[in-house]
Image (cartoon, rainbow, N blue to C red):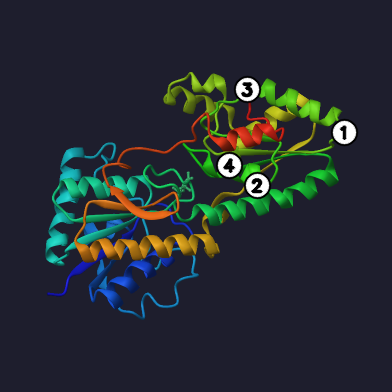
């Protein structure tokens, strides 16, 4: 009997989502003759029953397209909303998902997303649904896979931005601060900082000391370098802030009035060094547009591997890249976790070895 699966994309979008959808759907349809239902707007569409049949023309010609043809949302069915009748709301959402899973006669639900999406996938598997996960995010912070698709494209965009800041920094003898995405993990800032030759790289995993940064930048200027590039992850924080509770930290930030960490670091650097400093926040440009060749390859490989798992009925797994191999791990492995940059990671050593200050 023909099997049916539903596919959704959830969380922040990233380049490569459509390539992954195409990979799963093409292989599942052409190779394994499966029936495919596209679910709109992440878990929101599954709760609302916003589902449509996908035919080959829907997943043709989308390999290079940015965004997601299915749409996405940050709906987290298992998360309580403050002020609401919490448990009832969670129960209601999960019940609606289970009902729609049955109503649409799904043999499996394929979820394409980051930490939150795969964690929800795991929780739904615990509720008895057949689920498969695919790891996407520009943050590259999913446990169980060496790389997520989206990361490589964002890295290329961020590196180009740093390259472009170099010439203007040099012309004006300025310090240029660039803020990149990454709330909890600094993979993107660290990698782009290394690729773009950042003089200072600040990541959430290494709370910074502005005095150390000031000393580094002044020493650089005394050695004849008239400009500097500082790469900051959006989740970077000072050593002082690292000791605070989240609530207190948030309050402090609000009182300071800086729109984001990049602006704050720029202000601190100017105070510390007396050098004119400007801030650039790259923002959503990092998530938009066509996927890099590398992300297309990864998304296609992970997508087609997921179709293989569907065909074999191996559920409860997330497809993954481990070393040079495409495989899969139990959905339990990434659930509720974030892969941060370890202190002894070779990229930190590489950065320090070429004279980059990591903020301490
Ligand atoms: O996709 C992950 C991410 O890019 C994070 O680095 C960032 O903090 C977050 O998404 C912001 O996205 P949104 O505004 O869509 O929630």
Q: Earlier in the sequence, mark 3 or mark 4?
A: 4
| Mark seen at residue 224 | 1
Q: Residue at x 32, y 72 (%)?
A: 27
Query: In this figure, which residue is indicated by the disc labeled 2?
Result: 195
Q: Which residue is mark 3?
A: 209
Q: Are marks 2 and 3 in contact (CB under 8 Å)?
A: no
User: In whole angstroms, how far apart are the C-alphas of marks 2 and 4?
Assistant: 10 Å
**Left or right of 149: which side holds 50?**
left
Looking at the image, do the residues carrying marks 3 and 1 touch, with CB atoms under 8 Å apart? Answer: no
The residue mark sitting in front, 3 or 1, is: 1
Could you tell me how far apart the alpha carbons at marks 3 and 1 are, in whole angstroms? 24 Å
Q: Which x, y percent locates residue 85? A: 19, 39
Q: Disc 2 or 3, which lies upstream in sequence?
A: 2
Count up the numbered dots: 4
Whichever of labels 1 and 4 marks the residue nearer the N terminus, that label is 4
Asked whether, in this view, residue 221 is left or right of residue 46, the answer is: right
| N-term-proximal mark, 2 vs 4 | 4
Q: Earlier in the sequence, mark 3 or mark 1?
A: 3
Q: Dot 1 surroundings within 10 Å: few (below 14), some, or many (20 or more)?
A: few
Residue occupied by mark 4: 189
Q: Is residue 46 above or below residue 31?
A: above
Q: Secondary structure at mark 4?
A: helix
Specify whether residue 25 is in view. Answer: yes
């Amino acid at each position: 009997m023909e099997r049916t699966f539903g596919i959704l994309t959830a969380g922040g979008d990233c380049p490569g989502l459509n390539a992954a959808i195409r990979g799963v759907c093409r292989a599942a349809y052409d190779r394994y003759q499966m029936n495919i239902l596209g679910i709109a707007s992440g878990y929101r569409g599954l709760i609302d029953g916003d589902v449509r049949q996908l035919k080959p023309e829907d997943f043709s010609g989308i390999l290079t397209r940015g965004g997601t043809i299915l749409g996405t949302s940050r709906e987290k069915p298992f998360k309580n909303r403050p002020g609401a009748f919490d448990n009832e709301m969670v129960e209601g959402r999960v019940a609606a998902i289970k009902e729609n899973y049955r109503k649409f006669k799904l043999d499996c639900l394929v979820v394409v997303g980051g930490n939150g999406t795969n964690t929800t996938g795991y929780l739904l598997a615990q509720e008895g649904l057949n689920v498969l996960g695919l790891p996407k995010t520009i943050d590259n912070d999913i446990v169980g896979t060496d790389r997520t698709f989206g990361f490589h494209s964002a890295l290329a965009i961020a590196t180009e931005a740093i390259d472009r800041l170099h010439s203007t920094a040099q012309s004006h003898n300025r310090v240029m601060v660039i803020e990149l995405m990454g709330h909890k993990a600094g993979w993107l800032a660290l990698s782009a900082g290394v690729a773009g030759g950042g003089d200072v790289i600040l990541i959430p995993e290494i709370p910074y000391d502005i005095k150390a940064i000031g000393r580094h930048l002044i020493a650089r200027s005394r050695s004849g370098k008239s400009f500097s590039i500082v790469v900051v992850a959006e989740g970077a924080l000072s050593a002082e802030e690292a000791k605070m509770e989240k609530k207190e930290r948030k309050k402090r930030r609000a009182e300071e009035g800086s729109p984001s960490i990049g602006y704050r670091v720029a202000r601190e650097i100017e105070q510390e060094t007396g050098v004119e400093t400007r801030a650039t926040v790259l923002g959503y440009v990092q998530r938009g547009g066509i996927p890099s060749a590398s992300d297309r390859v990864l998304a296609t490989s992970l997508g087609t591997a997921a179709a293989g798992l569907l065909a074999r009925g191996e559920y409860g797994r997330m497809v993954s890249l481990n070393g040079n191999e495409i495989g899969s791990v139990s959905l339990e492995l990434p659930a509720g976790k974030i892969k941060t940059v370890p202190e002894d990671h070779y990229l930190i050593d590489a950065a320090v070895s070429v004279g980059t200050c990591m903020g301490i």
